[in-house]
Image: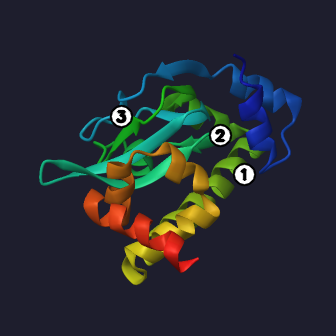
Amino acid sequence: MDSVMFKGFIENYVFLPETDWDAISKCLDAQIVKKGDFVLKEGQICNHLYFLEKGLLRFAILNNGEYATKFFTVAPYTFTSQYSFANRLPARESIEALETSFLWRISYEKSQELFRFESWTAFARKLTQEVQFFTELILEEAQNETAEKRYMKLLEHRPELVQRVPLKHLASYLGVTPQSLSRIRTKIPKQQ
């Protein structure tokens, strides 16, 4: 595989001169993460910025000995443990592959060197703003909407998650037990 998909992803955000892309592409390493394996475990320092070309990931935090799902990342998208990566501190979350996933990664050091390019700086800024917006939206929904309403939104806006994510992880994301989510799922068709 080559990294042409990542190039197209960046170009969705900014104009990317070919010379800039040449420098960025030289910083990329390919990585395959098998289903059930972790890209990052809580307590490790996240040393890479990633582009998920193929696959599905779950961000989770350890809570009373169990992983609670924060959110999912579906290909194609860029991700990292933002707090750990930016501050060079141990991660507060784990990142698990829910499907065998193909990633491109850039080390922290190389990503910092790329800030000499205006295109990379603009891309990083726009992507950070987008991730902050999504994070705020998830938090707001978790605080103000029922699990049933959030599940219905997933069905409407992100049906691929409902089909691809195991029930226990969806339930964890919605803040309910798998049994409660099963009840919600059986109720919904009757309302439509």
SS class, disc 1:
helix
Report which quarter residue 146 is drawn in: bottom left
Indicate the position of residue 98 as horizontal and vertical percent values: 43, 36
Mark 1 vs mark 2, foreground winner is: 2
- Disc sitting over residue 104 in the figure: none
The numbered mark, 1 or 2, whose residue comes first in the sequence reads 2
The amino acid pointed to by label 2 is: Pro
In the picture as drawn, the residue positioned furthest to the left comes out as 64
Q: Residues within 10 Å of mark 2 (few under 14, many from 20)?
A: some
The residue sitting at 18% across, 49% down in the picture is 66
In the picture as drawn, the residue positioned furthest to the front comes out as 190
Foreground: 21 or 71?
Answer: 71
| C-alpha separation, residue under disc 2 versus residue under disc 3 | 19 Å
User: From the viewer's perspective, is 189 left or right of 167?
Assistant: right
The numbered mark, 3 or 1, whose residue comes first in the sequence reads 3
Indicate the position of residue 141 as horizontal and vertical percent values: 46, 75
SS class, disc 2:
loop
Quadrant placement of the N terminus: top right
- Disc sitting over residue 76 in the figure: 2
Mark 2 vs mark 3, foreground winner is: 2
Foreground: 62 or 27?
Answer: 62
Report which quarter residue 147 is drawn in: bottom left
The answer to whether residue 176 shows anywhere in this view is no
| C-alpha separation, residue under disc 3 versus residue under disc 1 | 26 Å
- Disc sitting over residue 122 in the figure: 1
Task: Identify whether 31 is placed above or below 136.
Answer: above
Quadrant placement of the C terminus: bottom right
In the picture as drawn, the residue positioned furthest to the top comes out as 1
Indicate the position of residue 175 as horizontal and vertical percent values: 31, 66
